[in-house]
Image (tube, rainbow, N blue to C red):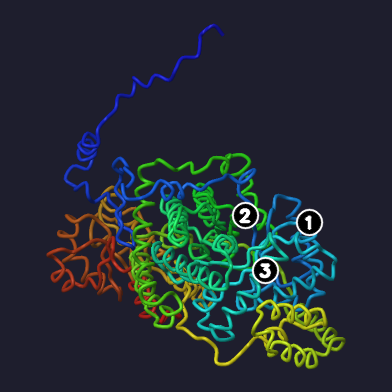
Amino acid sequence: MTDAIRPYPWEDFPPHSFDAWKEAAQQVLKQTPLERLTQHTLDGLSRPPLAPTYAPPQDLSPSLLDSRRGTQIPQGGWSIAQRYTHPDPQVLLHDLSHDLQHGLHAAWIDVSALNSTPFASALQPLCALFDGQGIPLYLDAEADAMAFSALRIAAAQRAAIPLSSLRGSWCLDPLGVAAATGYLHNRLEDAKHRTLALVQWSLQHTPQMRTLRVSALPYHHAGASVAQELAATLATATTYLRWLCEADISLEEAAQQMLFDLPVTCDVFVEIAKLRALRMLWSRVLSFSLGRSAEITPHFHARTSPRILTQRDVWVNLLRATTATFAASIGGAQSIECTPFDTALQIPDAFSQRIARNTQVILQEESHLGHVLDPAGGSDTIEHLTEQIANAAWGLFQSIEAQGGLPTVLQQSSLQQAISETAHKRLSRIAQRKDLITGVSAFPFLNERPPQPPPIDHNALRSRLASALQKHILDYPQEAISRSLRSSIEAPDTTQDPTTLLLSLVHAAHQGATLETLSNALSIDPRWQVPPLEPHRDAERFEILRDASDAYLQQHGQRPQIFLVNLGPIPQHRPRADFARQLFEAGGFESIDNGGYSSPEEAVQAYQNHLTPAAILCSNDAAYVEMIPQIAPMLKAAGVRHLYLAGKPAQHEAAWRSAGVDQFVFLGCDACATLEALQQALSIRTNHA
């Protein structure tokens, strides 16, 4: 080649002003106001279609502005994590061994699987696999985190694994457990004392472990907005920070003990901004506490939100998980957990686990994500969103602090009430199909074939595990171990020195104490109680309708049906017919479609070949005005018990209802309420309250 490489011809793309864009956009929209393109979040934040040029606030220090970007890029990108819930410890160990050779960097073992390994010797193979090789392991035992920590320590010691090589987290999160379940196994002061015990011991013996898990999941699962989620997370971390600093642990050491566990949805821009905003907010808290700029990088573990996953058309969850993983990587999470697509339906099998893991591998190795620090930084849209979310969350956080901190707010249930109100708004938007769920409320597929759950003989598994536990109890009588442990816990030096408590638990684990024995020893009345947050998935209400339809199909050999009375040629009726078909199929109703009818008589004659109890009129407004006075009474006379019309009636509502139309469905109507009412009218069983 003889031609020299020349600079890109930017002169071919002359700059345009924001006003010029608005003028061009308004020409396309014609009579529709440009403001209609602006979206609004549940926090009341505005998301315009094109953000104006971003200018950083003058009252923020450069260090706070820089904190949103992070300070370092993980070597080779983020850590690929996976959650394991299989109840069979043998299968669990096999899956972990396999996955570690195929791209897995870290593992979260869920409480449902942990209950099958209730004593230290049973944990030894797991510890040898992870702790023996310095691979991060997260034992998510929720309320039993302290007891399982003792079992893991004892297992590592029995396997002669240096404690300094242990990596991961003890996942101690008493406030998160209380918010999710409504109680702790002891008083709040006891939870604080035990938190200090594990932190002080861990600082000396397991320096690579993070003791505390600051989880946003209880608030997110309950339907919190982004600002509420961040405010609760920040308030949790600040409470733990106070606990540790009051025990003369330095602020830097206290901050390094925390792992932020953050759910991520497929709202890409918002989720990227959320991670950046939390990084900025946490830096602000640390800077205020230190009296100077803080250079402490928080560890963000992001996971695909289980709230957005569906039980219907689960293959679409692959797209949701990929999108959320992309957002988490761009947002700068140090470790990411891509939730398998069938999680809401069953225990993930080897295939779905492999797909989830490979989703991250492809994004990392083939898309080369995770190699650039804050790639979204500088985007006007992202910067505006980051600032808006940070300001909204900071205001809510200050309100929590003004009321006495997170423990007080949880006891007063003001936070739970606020989140419940937000969840109601979210679910209302979903019910009205303003926020669509593909495969559930939009483009439902009634004839789908869901994946088959992996065959597990639960009775045989329970019997095998019970036999192993019974043999262990015979070899290590728990009553004597429990008495000794209680005596150690109640000794004066245990209440004075927090680390003595942990050593007592580890000693009991070496003696053969089971999880139940350790947990019972840590349980003290009266328990600390708060009103619990109620978790839910976004698609649940529609899925209940589909479950009722499946039951009807199994009982009657066909699904409940609705006849589409399409009036006029295809261009005239098709838009509203497609709308009606999707709406009713989202509730499990099979639509009897057609190419349209030219007269009321033709439509009624076609209906008489099916005689479904429900029918819906679909056409344009002009056809409605002309034909409804005649066709509605004819359809009712032919046997239609429930007659719907697709579209808003405007000034014709009274006349059309008088003619026989029972209900109108349109964009923004409460689709769930409409479908539930029809199911109940047709005596189709539904569990919705």
Quickly name the residue at label 2: 356
Residue visible at 76% across and 82% down?
514
As helix, strand or loop, the secondary structure at mark 3 comes to strand
In the picture, which quadrant includes the C terminus?
A: bottom left
**Residue 109 vs residue 657: left or right?**
right
Front one among 501 and 70? 501
As helix, strand or loop, the secondary structure at mark 2 comes to helix
Q: Position of residue 141 (x, y in %)?
A: 64, 74
Q: Position of residue 621 (x, y in %)?
A: 19, 56
Front one among 493 and 685? 493
Q: Position of residue 559 (x, y in %)?
A: 47, 70
Inspect this view and state whether residue 516 appears: yes
Quickly name the residue at label 1: 133
As helix, strand or loop, the secondary structure at mark 1 comes to helix
Q: Which mark is residue 579?
A: none
Mark 1–mark 3 CB contact (< 8 Å): no
In the picture, which quadrant includes the N terminus?
A: top right
Marks 1/2: CA–CA distance: 23 Å
Marks 1/3: CA–CA distance: 16 Å
Please tell me whether mark 2 or mark 3 is closer to you in this view. 3
Q: Which residue lies furthest to the right in this view?
A: 475
Label 2 environment density (alpha carbons within 10 Å; few <14, some 14–19, many ≥20)? many
Front one among 293 and 560? 293
Inspect this view and state whether residue 95 appears: no
Front one among 177 and 575? 177
Q: Where is residue 330 in the image (x, y as percent from the top left)?
A: 50, 47
Question: Is tag 2's residue or tag 3's residue first in the polypeptide sequence?
Answer: 3
Residue visible at 74% across and 71% down?
152
Amino acid residing under circle 3? Leu
**Residue 508 vs residue 432: left or right?**
right
Question: Is tag 1's residue or tag 3's residue first in the polypeptide sequence?
Answer: 1
